Amino acid sequence: MDLIRDRTRYWSRLEKLVEDALIKVSSVASTLKTVSTRDMIEALIAGQRDPRALADLVRGAMRGIRTALIEALTGRFDAHHGELARVLLDQIDRLDTEIAKVTQRIGVLLDQIDSPPPSQTPAAVTTLRR
């Protein structure tokens, strides 16, 4: 599906962008797609540059790697990076919405295929087969 491929491409571009700013969060976190890393990127976009404050945004299991996160979040992320990151995240969010719509529509269509038409109940189908 092109939407999924496009979304993957935007995630890759976002990762390259933050690495260009010497933010190496992907070396510590398994993916940028977690709630914690999203919160950190949103904070960077909003102007937060303190690695300790950014590391304080982590949740769950990532709390155990706070020291490594502080080091990974020490970089040169500036307003220009923030503008580009905002554009990329907005595109990712838009694609997530479109993918969800298409997925829901596919589910509806599959349900219609799996269900007998309203005029043919299972009893009527059995009668027709005899």
Image: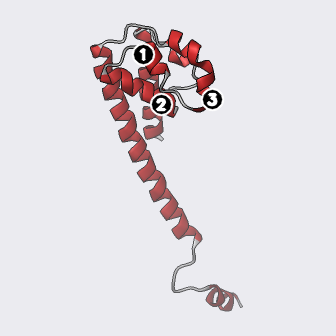
Query: Of tags 1 and 3, which is closer to the observer?
Result: 3
The answer to which of 56 and 85 lies nearer the viewer is: 56
Q: Secondary structure at mark 3?
A: helix
Dot 2 or dot 1: first in sequence order is 2
Q: Badge 3: few (under 14), some or many (20 or more) residues near its Cα, within 10 Å?
A: few
Would you place residue 33 above or below residue 49 in this image? below
Q: Relative to residue 78, is residue 130 drawn left or right?
A: right
Rounded to the nearest angstrom, the CA distance separating label 2 from label 1 is: 16 Å
User: Pointer 2: what residue?
Assistant: 8
Instruction: Give percent across and percent down for residue 52.
Output: 47, 15
Q: Residue at x 63, y 29 (%)?
A: 61
Is the C-beta separation of discs 2 and 3 under 8 Å? no
The answer to which of 15 and 55 lies nearer the viewer is: 55
User: Pointer 1: what residue?
Assistant: 18
Would you place residue 12 above or below residue 59 in this image? above
Instruction: Identify the image quadrant of residue 77.
Output: top left
Instruction: Give percent across and percent down for residue 29.
Output: 57, 22
Dot 2 or dot 3: first in sequence order is 2
Q: Residue at x 44, y 20 (%)?
A: 54
Instruction: Give percent across and percent down for residue 91.
Output: 35, 34
Q: Give the amino acid type for the residue marked by disc 2 in the picture.
A: Thr
Query: Of tags 2 and 1, which is closer to the observer?
Result: 1
Q: Give the amino acid type for the residue marked by disc 3 in the picture.
A: Ala
Q: Residue at x 51, y 83 (%)?
A: 118
Q: Give the amino acid type for the residue marked by disc 1 in the picture.
A: Val
User: Pointer 3: what residue?
Assistant: 61
Q: Secondary structure at mark 2?
A: helix
Q: Secondary structure at mark 1?
A: helix
